[in-house]
Amino acid sequence: MRSRILIFVISVVLLAALALPGQVAAQHVRYKLIDMGTFGGPASYLTNPGNGPGFLVLNDAGVFAGRSDTATFDPIIGDFRAHAFRWAKGVLNDLGTPADAVFSQANGINARGSLAIDYTADEIDPVTGGPIFRGAFWQNGKFVDVGTLGGLETDALYVNNSDQVVGVSTVDTTPYPSFLGAAVHAFIWQDGVIRDLGTLGGPTSGPSGWCGGAMTNLVAGGSDIDSIPNPDTGAPTQHPFLWDNGKMIDLGTLGGTQLGPLQCANSRRQVAGAMTLPGDSVLHAYRWEHGVMTDLGTLGGDNSYSTWMNEEGDVVGEADLPGADVTGIHHAFLWRNGTMIDLGTLGPSTSHAVAVSAKGQVVGRFRIGDVDNPLQHAFIWENGGPMVDLNTLVVGSSTLELFDAENINDRGWIAGRGFPPGCTDHDACPHAYLLIPCEPPAGQDCSPVTATQADAVLLSEQAASSTKKQLTARQRLAAWRAQLDKRIHVGRGGDD
């Protein structure tokens, strides 16, 4: 049952950094590395392994959440039992699980540090034959179950700044070909009440990730508009939606019938996502605003899709270069003010942007070798470029090889995953990490540490110092997305 937990897994084994540290250090901020370690098991993660686009687990206050393995392997889950963690001001807290549960993971965090949690008690879903997963709201040390919409399973995907939990839940126990084994609807939960957001006319709907902002009573997602299978895809037509204060708005299409992996809204009611063009063989990123869906285009090839949008409406993702149908080459992009900017790559082939801050700092990953080589490194792109390998910006002797970067907050802190020494199995032993801007020599200890060794007072002082410098200088829904992606014949499904 590992597939119920593992989402957007990337096949990576890391090599040495490619750029020269002496050159990049003079031009870019350096970072203190905080290795989150584990709770006795082999790995720790941001949400699931490879959290996928649109999952916010690092807030602007510097509070970071995820999941960490314990030493106990659970045959029902098919993975190690894990606990949600929460790191703040140098202190790593094991949040445990709700009563009687054996597994928990944090899927999202809000500005207050409250969390959206998934958990299981190893109960078996008779429809799927796998463990039943439920959703919870975590705040001030307490788990509150969010319930279901009538079925057995719930995914709590994120929590906005008004402490509203958004997710997807089964509406009954009648078998239906969704990733939870029954028809699912998007929901919003607050103060003990779960609300069914309905659909656009078909049997299923689901929210996408949350890219930050206040977002009260605002949910972006996708929905079937009917139950009629299309001849090319075998699936009903899907449209993106924006649920705004009780009304589900159909955002229209780019001419196709299927959604890409993400619809992401900001507080300005702009929505970014991806949809197929007529024929359902090509996928393009879009941005929707005030009733108008804008095709963001590509970098000269056939396909593109988005992964994140900031409050300014900047969109990042990946897009094909000319000839990508043969070469497989795609690059990270930043779309701003009507222009798609090619962020390039540091290797000979591909790159993929995952998140963008309010100040336009973009983080993601690039492939070190050719398109058939799984080796990747984390990057940052800022101030007009070029892209820089984050491994070259870590102060001191790093304890991890950083293979991706998945969140960046507006203080310039970065969260991602890396391999500790000796880890050669990308599924088995990555560690979550946090990078905090830290410039020696300035009376600061910028040496890499593990979270259990971090000094809360020291890190608080460094955070305040680096914030001032920056301000003056800046599965489970992924399984839902993967299910939708399989209906689209674009050949990548979200991996680099």
Image: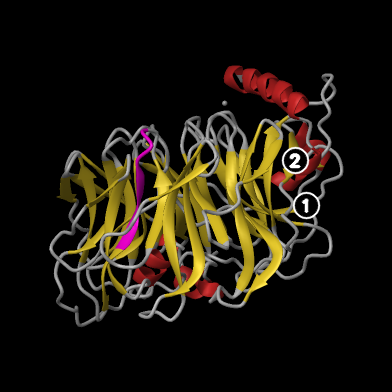
Residue kind at label 2, given as amino acid type: Leu
Q: Secondary structure at mark 2?
A: strand
- The numbered mark, 1 or 2, whose residue comes first in the sequence reads 2
Residue kind at label 1, given as amino acid type: Leu
- Residue 353 in view in this figure: yes
Judge left or right: residue 369 versus residue 266. right
Q: Which residue bears the numbered disc 1?
A: 400
Q: Is residue 305 magenta?
A: no
Q: Is residue 164 magenta?
A: yes
Judge left or right: residue 303 versus residue 355. left
Q: Residue furthest front?
A: 100
Q: Quadrant of residue 182?
A: bottom left
Query: How far apart in space, not on screen, are marks 1 and 2 (Cα)?
Result: 9 Å
Judge left or right: residue 445 versus residue 125. right
Q: Position of residue 105 (x, y in %)?
A: 54, 55
- Would you say the residues marked 1 and 2 are in contact, meaning their CB atoms lie under 8 Å apart? yes
Q: Secondary structure at mark 1?
A: loop
Q: Position of residue 447 (x, y in %)?
A: 84, 36
- Taking depth in this image into account, of 418 and 175 the one nearest to the observer is 175
Chief SS of the magenta region: strand
- Taking depth in this image into account, of 215 and 362 the one nearest to the observer is 215
Q: Which residue bears the numbered disc 2?
A: 33
The residue depicted at 75 percent of the width and 40 percent of the height is 33
Q: Position of residue 253 (x, y in %)?
A: 20, 58
Range shown magenta: 162-169
The residue depicted at 49 percent of the width and 75 percent of the height is 326
